[in-house]
Amino acid sequence: MAITDVSDTGAGATITFGTTTFAARIRSIQIGEWSVEMLDDSILSSTGFRKMIASDLTSATPVVVNMAFPTGLTLPTIGGTAETMTITFPLRSAGGETTAANIAGTAQFTKIVFPTLQLGQLQEGSYEFMWTGGTGPTFTKAVGP
């Protein structure tokens, strides 16, 4: 199968929430990673390398969103009700995509980082949310030519 994907920047990426109306000006989105823990299945008669098997469940790291700090907006509730959160990737300008890729699932806000207030610097902060596993998260690939 030929690889026809074209890389692009993050310009145009968005985050939407199922019930929260928070809409800060996003500077970057660190989606994080998904991983599975490897379990040691070695026994006393094992030789060479340890025998490893994948755990049953996948873990995700928090999503970190850096933003221009919104002093005029009500901040999201930390530890509030879980809701559907969707990260939508930008349509790739050179890829001919008609529908953007996205990651969606049930998540909760877990952290707000307030800005450092200083001369000559933008007031930037961040918020984090964590996938709860209620639904997803699920990556849906982009649709293109």
Image (cartoon, rainbow, N blue to C red):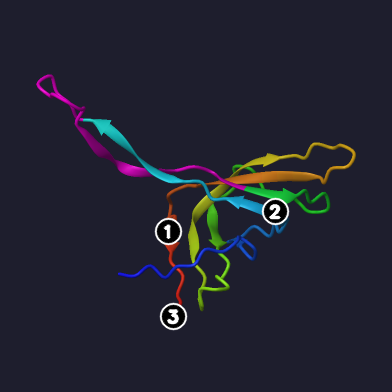
The disc at residue 145 is: 3
Q: Which residues are magenta?
A: 41-64
Secondary element at image label 3: loop
Q: CA distance from mark 1 to mark 3?
A: 22 Å
In the displayed structure, 98 sits above or below 87; it is below
Q: At label 1, which amino acid type do we have?
A: Thr
Determine whether, in the image, residue 102 is placed left or right of residue 127. left
Q: Earlier in the sequence, mark 1 or mark 3?
A: 1
Q: Earlier in the sequence, mark 2 or mark 3?
A: 2
Q: CA distance from mark 2 to mark 3?
A: 30 Å
Q: At label 2, which amino acid type do we have?
A: Arg
In the displayed structure, 94 sits above or below 27; it is below
Pair 2/3: label in front: 3
Secondary element at image label 2: strand
Q: Quadrant of the C terminus?
A: bottom left
Q: Identify the residue shown where x is 61% and y is 60%.
A: 19
Q: How many marks overall?
A: 3
Give the labeled residue for mark 2. 27
Q: CA distance from mark 2 to mark 1?
A: 23 Å
Magenta includes 95? no
Determine whether, in the image, residue 121 is placed left or right of residue 141. right
The disc at residue 138 is: 1
Q: Nearer the viewer, residue 79 or 94?
A: 94
Q: Nearer the viewer, residue 48 or 105?
A: 48
Secondary element at image label 1: strand
